[in-house]
Amino acid sequence: MSALNTRDCPTASECASCGRRRKLVVREVDSDAGPACVTVCESCAELRDLPPLNPFIAPICVEAHRVHLGLAVSS
């Protein structure tokens, strides 16, 4: 879980784990498709309570994260 790799990633409006809407941070999660970014609250980040990515949308999330990192060109 890396904060450095998520500094250019957008923050969603709520925690993907618990639904809180305050003190949100973006963290990197691993999926079968590769690393992706996810928004969680500080409490879930500290507990490492990161949600699993749905395998059907994981490739889309991974590609979006690659764009945030400057590793892919958005179309």
Image (cartoon, rainbow, N blue to C red):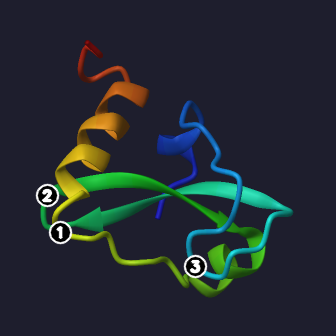
Amino acid tagged 3: Ser
User: Nearer the N terminus, badge 3 or badge 1?
Assistant: 3
Q: Position of residue 2 (x, y in %)?
A: 49, 56
Amino acid tagged 2: Ala
Amino acid tagged 1: Pro
Seen at 80% across and 64% down, the residue is 21
Q: Are marks 3 and 1 in contact (CB under 8 Å)?
A: no
Mark 1 highlights which residue? 55
Mark 3 highlights which residue? 17
Q: Is residue 55 left or right of residue 49?
A: left
Seen at 54% across and 37% down, the residue is 9
Q: Position of residue 33 (x, y in %)?
A: 13, 57
Q: Are marks 1 and 2 in contact (CB under 8 Å)?
A: yes
Identify the element where label 2 is drawn.
loop
Q: Are marks 2 and 3 in contact (CB under 8 Å)?
A: no
Q: Residues within 10 Å of mark 1 (few under 14, many from 20)?
A: few
Q: Position of residue 4 (x, y in %)?
A: 55, 44
Mark 2 highlights which residue? 33
User: Nearer the N terminus, badge 2 or badge 3?
Assistant: 3
Q: Residues within 10 Å of mark 2 (few under 14, many from 20)?
A: some
Q: CA distance from mark 1 to mark 2?
A: 8 Å
Q: Is residue 14 above or below residue 44?
A: above
Q: CA distance from mark 3 to mark 1?
A: 16 Å
